[in-house]
Image (cartoon, grey):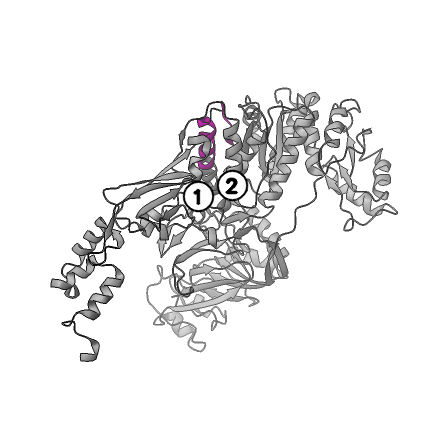
Amino acid sequence: MKTLICDCNRTMPLTPQSLAPVSQALAKTPLASAEGLETVHTLLCRREAGAFQRAAASGEPLLVACTQESRLFLALAEQTEGAPSLAERPIRFVNIRESGGWSKDAKAAAPKLAALLAAAQLPDPEPVATVGYRSQGRCLVIGGADAAARAVAMLADSLELTLLLDRAGGALPQAREQAVQAGRLTRLAGWLGAFKAEWESSNPIDLDLCTRCNACIDACPEGAIDFSYQIDLAACRSHRDCVKACAAAGAIDFQRAPQRSEAEFDLVLDLREAPAFSMHQPPQGYFHVGGDERKLVAAVLELRALGRGEFEKPKYVQYRPRLCAHSRNERIGCSACIEVCSARAIRSDASRKGKAKGDSAGGIVVEPHLCVGCGACSTVCPSGALAFGYPGAVDQGKRWRTLLGAYARAGGKDAALLLHSEGAGARIIGELGRAARTDASIHGVPARVLPVALWHTASTGIELWLAAIAAGASQVWVLLSEEEAPEYREALAEQMAVAQAILAGLGYRGEHFKCIAVRDARDLAELDAALRTNPAQGVAQPAPLAAQAEKRATLEIALDHLLAQAPAPAESIELPRAGAPLGTLAVDGAKCTLCLSCVGACPEGALLDNPEKPQLRFIEKNCVQCGLCAITCPEDAIVLQPRLWLADGGKARKSARVLAEAEPYRCIRCGKPFGTLRAIEAMMLKLAGHSAFQGEAAKRLQMCADCRVIDIHSNPNEIKITDL
């Protein structure tokens, strides 16, 4: 791939000599190329545009180190004779200017430049499945008559509108051009192309029968009726003159029972003060503007774009039920994904109804039409049952590995990954870079800070963060803007607290993880200061970041390398309780009867029985701290203890150990062990009053299953069904 690089009218310190380390690093980086770096352009988008066109006509893959003029370059490529079409050979772009070329230490940014160029040359991730929507232009407008009339004026030419007036007041147009309903919205559910609305009308005027003749308005002595053609019942004094005036049409009936109605819509425009959906991310196709005129204009533009047609979006999340630790036997364990989802796209499916016989597992349901792709569910999921796929962990890990590898090969040290969104996060970094160019007090993005654009900042978690540290990063920071829901901020903070506790317990000094919250350009000075934080201690010998498709596998690989390089590892690291995906169990031996119900409830194979003797065994590496064992235990004998156990060089947590055991109870007839003393005593106590276990029959509780059957059939005094 050929790279076209420009110093933007000599505002960046780029020369063939300064780019020599970059070329050398790219030559050693897999899937990267240093071709084109021998030439530094000054005005590639203007006077030297011919150089771009010649490169475009060559037909070879092309990377342009400028994002500001990407639209211009694409237009030039389309107009260049002999150049392949953009569909046949897309042109890539990468920002090197605001992300570091304009910072005060830009002369030291060659390693960063190598990292950014190498990552930009990587092949695109494999495409993911898509989710489809279909809109036929049926739009429900909810609000007062005046606000609805304004919206109608902007949308009537492109959408099929239905107005739902939620209160009296205002004025409808005299001409009946849209369907008009009146009432209180009682339920709204669905998404783009599939909304279902329900409302209840208790107003005496039936808008379907009303002819808008205005006779009722003229007749009402209190002025309780206006051009919304609804009666203000608080002002009405029961003269009922309006009923007489409307006798021919029969549209007014004070005795009419409340009417419940429902209908389906593709789009919803909500003009009320309080929205129908309270979550941070409402369904796609729903727009709440309240009384904000600017929001109304923005919503109208989007509604017109979504009016009619078929639409697609990526299926962001993959769900693997076999790994899910949400429920077993209708008992609820981990609900982290449900609690963090700001779109309410995830719900519990713990019931066994409709499931195959013998299937005691329950799980969750992810509604892809509601999912907005934040990926926070995969970040907080301790087992990896939910995996973000846009891009997936393997592709994301490959990108980070390329960044860190190229950075190190070019001589860079103490790299800090700055994870930011492709939307607001990228804009904020751009604003910081521009401020650094014109404001002497602003430093800009430091040379050691590598910006990494994500579809959403909540889409990566502890396993990739720790893997990045193991691969040589000094720190991992997440830039938060006003895009992020409060649930995401809390989840990221919890995950970072766990990751930081692990590194501190291993002896790595400094603050390795933090969230940097920024509103917009008002906070550039604070962001600038936060990015100039001193490096934290990293590994002495980095390992290639090998992200796996399985979340727990990536986490284990990272932990093994961090432990091998640890300056001063503790034998056991206590972890914060909130969000910890690692830990052990404390079993109260005085309570535990070794009923082994916890073994059946454990979804991860962390709890095991022993076929040879009454034992409860545990593999700590497999435990995700979901709590299903503690919830299932009938004796309340299990307590979760979040920690990272590193005894025997980390090997101990990967082997089965005994948590509880007891001497077996032996059958009083044949002597075969079949239970534990405590379990048999508890059973005898609970069944002491049962009619089937009185007198000699009570001894059957002390027999194994075989002897119990023999005793029943060999007892001459036993009543048989054939005797009845």
Dot 2 corresponds to which residue?
A: 484
Which amino acid lies under the numbered mark 2 shown in the image of this protein? Glu
Dot 1 corresponds to which residue?
A: 622
Q: Residues within 10 Å of mark 1 (few under 14, many from 20)?
A: many
Q: Give the range drawn in magenta.
A: 494-518
Give the left or right position of residue 128, taking residue 724 as reference: right
Dividing the picture into quadrants, the one containing residue 415 is: top right
Give the left or right position of residue 418, taking residue 571 as reference: right
Residue 154: horizontal and vertical position, in percent? 61, 56
Closer to the camera in the image, 697 or 234: 697
Question: Compared with residue 718, is residue 544 higher up or lower down, i.e. above or below?
Answer: above
The residue drawn where x is 33% and y is 64% is 237
Question: Compared with residue 613, is residue 695 higher up or lower down, i.e. above or below?
Answer: below
Q: Does the magenta stretch include residue 546?
A: no
Give the left or right position of residue 115, taking residue 210 as reference: right
Residue 532: horizontal and vertical position, in percent? 57, 23
The residue drawn where x is 71% and y is 33% is 29
Is residue 461 at least partly visible in the picture?
A: no
- Give residue 523's mark: none
Dividing the picture into quadrants, the one containing residue 626 is: top left
Q: Is residue 513 magenta?
A: yes
Q: Residue furthest right?
A: 81
Residue 623: horizontal and vertical position, in percent? 41, 43
Q: Residues within 10 Å of mark 2 (few under 14, many from 20)?
A: many
